[in-house]
Image (cartoon, rainbow, N blue to C red):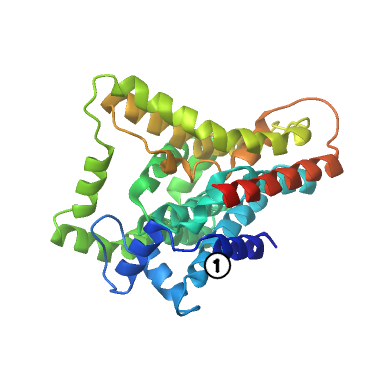
Amino acid sequence: VRTVAWVVLSAVALANPPLDLVEWLSWGHSLQWGYPKHPPLPAWLAAGFARLSPGDVIGVYLLAYLTVSGCFWAAWKLAREFVSPPRALLAALCLEGSLYFTADPAEWSNNVALDLGWAAVILFGFHAVRTASTRWWAATGVAIGLTLLCKYTLGVLLLPLGAYLALDPHARRNLSRPGPYVAVAVAAAVFAPHLVWLVQNDFITLTYASERSADPRWYSRVWNPTAFVLGQSYHVLPMLVVLWPAVGKRFVVDTPESRSRVRYLHAAVLGPVAILLALSVVTGCQIREIWGSPLWTFLGVWVLVTVGGEGEMNLPRALRRAALVAVAMLAVAVFK
């Protein structure tokens, strides 16, 4: 329902395709293993889905909001590993409170594609660590490889997940099994053609990213991380409004396995935020607001697992809040 609503709204409200979308379409019509600014997969997808609606870009709007729906599904699936079905529903519906999952996807870009890949890496990685299944590890490797073909920012997620795998006693058992090495091999195989292109083209995408984030101002080490936190607040606060009625039943952490699962959640949700802020503080680089788009897919899961209280959730009231926020975000998109 939300996918149809947002596709129709985008088609009606946007008389012209957004600038980023035009750029991606122009790239995608010439299939290459890379483009001047970014890896190739989002451009390929844009060009492919544009063929569904010749003469306009409704097909790309469909691609964008199907991608977002995949993020909702991932939030729901991971939440069900920790909390009851009603709370898991709120962990997904809270995403209605962020522009990253409502109005912004109409401007299809590598950031929208990154959101789903990032979510898939976290979800598949969770099952891979928990089950030690080689198939889940292989699926994680595919997700990593494809997401790196969307944007290299995935690295700030892989670092804390790698640290978790090495340091957590329950997760570390996987290192004595083939699973993690299968994931690395699969990811490398998927990413290898782009890596060859990158070398052949003098690492042009990395040069672009470095120049775009550089900030020579003397106060950049303070201003840039502060501005990023402030910019993310208006994405996060409406999500918390949706979650508020569900706060009150803490996830039970009473076994080594459950403690390990919660640590995984901390690494996946808090780790990338900490790395981005630390990078900005140390180097003074600018963290653009849109770079926060993949960070919050599992915020609802993290809040419901880590924040305790009293009382049971009033599901009808919670759903009314979610509906109100969803309607408000539709209105914001119309008048934006």
- Left or right, 329 with reference to 87: left
Residue 284 on image: x %, y %: 28, 27
Tell me what residue is drawn at x 39 percent, y 47 percent.
Answer: 154
Question: Residue 258: in sight, yes or no?
Answer: no
Residue 287 on image: x %, y %: 36, 35
42 shown above or below 235: below
Residue 176 on image: x %, y %: 44, 48
Q: Quadrant of the N terminus?
A: bottom right
- Left or right, 222 with reference to 69: left
Question: Residue 242: in sight, yes or no?
Answer: yes
Tell me what residue is drawn at x 82 percent, y 25 percent.
Answer: 310
Mark 1: secondary structure: helix
Tell me if mark 1 has few (under 14), some (14-19) or many (20+) residues whose alpha carbon lies within 10 angstroms of its own.
Answer: many
Q: Nearer the viewer, residue 155 or 35?
A: 35
Q: Quadrant of residue 193?
A: bottom left
Residue 73 on image: x %, y %: 63, 56
Which amino acid type corresponds to the residue marked 1 in the rendered image?
A: Leu
Tell me what residue is drawn at x 33 percent, y 30 percent.
Answer: 279
Mark 1 sits on what residue?
62
